[in-house]
Amino acid sequence: MSLLRLLSFLLLFAAAGAEARGFLDWGREDVPAISVDRLPPEARETLALIHQGGPFPYRRDGIRFQNREGRLPDAAPAYYREYTVPTPGSRDRGARRIVSGGNPPSVFYYSGDHYRSFRRIQE
């Protein structure tokens, strides 16, 4: 392999690695947004309950969300709390959640797929 060809290969490999890192780090600081009116009705109801301080229908509502996957911006350990968004027809809590940040909560995120992805809620 010629030196020029080797150098081209290495540059291509480095560029692909940077793109992959960008994808894997898909925006911990830049979470895509969703407006409240685009949320499912059950998510809007859960958000209203969070704003009024409950009562919440699920005993695990309000527990600490640890952000283990790092999909939300880094924060102090007790910063995030999670709440169930009921899924019609589901026999359990389902996969939908709202995660709040702050005390009192000042930022909210919606996940429709059990934390695989998030959208920052714009109120």
Image (tube, rainbow, N blue to C red):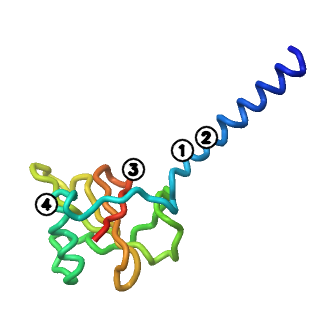
Evaluate if marks 4 and 3 touch, with contact meaning CB atoms under 8 Å apart. Answer: no
SS assignment at label 4? helix
Residue 116 marker: 3
Q: Which residue occupies the extreme left position in the image?
A: 89
SS assignment at label 3? loop
Q: Position of residue 100 (x, y in %)?
A: 35, 72
Q: Which residue occupies the extreme top position in the image?
A: 1
- Amino acid on which the number 4 mark rests in the picture: Pro
**How far is mark 4 from mark 2, CA to CA?**
36 Å
Residue position marked by numbered label 1 in the rendering: 23
Q: Nearer the viewer, mark 3 or mark 2?
A: 2
SS assignment at label 2? helix
Q: Position of residue 106 (x, y in %)?
A: 36, 79
Evaluate if marks 2 and 1 touch, with contact meaning CB atoms under 8 Å apart. Answer: yes
The crowding category of the residue bearing disc 4, from other C-alpha atoms within 10 Å (few below 14, some 14 to 19, many at least 20), is few
Q: Which residue: 23% across, 80% down?
A: 51
Front-most of 37 and 100? 37
- Amino acid on which the number 2 mark rests in the picture: Glu
- Amino acid on which the number 1 mark rests in the picture: Phe
Residue 41 marker: 4
